[in-house]
Amino acid sequence: MSVCELEKDETVHGLNTFFESLARDWRGWKGERIWSSLEGEFHITALHNGLGTVELIVSVGHREPTSAGVWDATVTLFFDAGGLDALARQAPSAWD
């Protein structure tokens, strides 16, 4: 499965930028932070509990009917907020 972002100069919030913002604000933020691929088949929601834990809800799927059908998978991951800088360094960037 492939996902797309906007072109480099048009990308407002690329995936690597999303992870960098989480690392920069490791002490916390209010509400949800959301990143989604251009066509919505890959989606990440980040929540900070204010106590040092970040919850990432990651969803992938194919929502348009095809011969393979429609499918969706979601996983919830928990990270220590102080370790987000390591996660940000490992986040993919299509423009590197």
Image: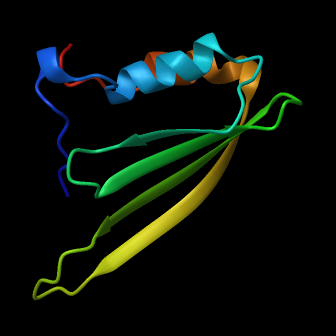
Furthest residue toward right: 51
Q: What is the count of numbered marks? A: 0
Find residue 34 and report its horizontal and vertical position in percent.
48, 40
Which corner quadrant of the image does residue 59 belong to? bottom left
Find residue 94 and report its horizontal and vertical position in percent.
20, 25
Image quarter hosting the N terminus? bottom left
The one nearer the camera, 25 or 75, is: 25
Q: Quick check: 91 left or right of 56?
A: left
Q: Quick check: 68 left or right of 44?
A: left
Q: Quick check: 71 left or right of 94?
A: right
6 lies above or below 96: below
Find residue 77 and report its horizontal and vertical position in percent.
64, 49
Residue located 50% across and 53% down the image? 58
80 lies above or below 60: above
Residue located 75% across and 23% down the image? 28
Image quarter hosting the C terminus? top left
The one nearer the camera, 47 or 87, is: 47
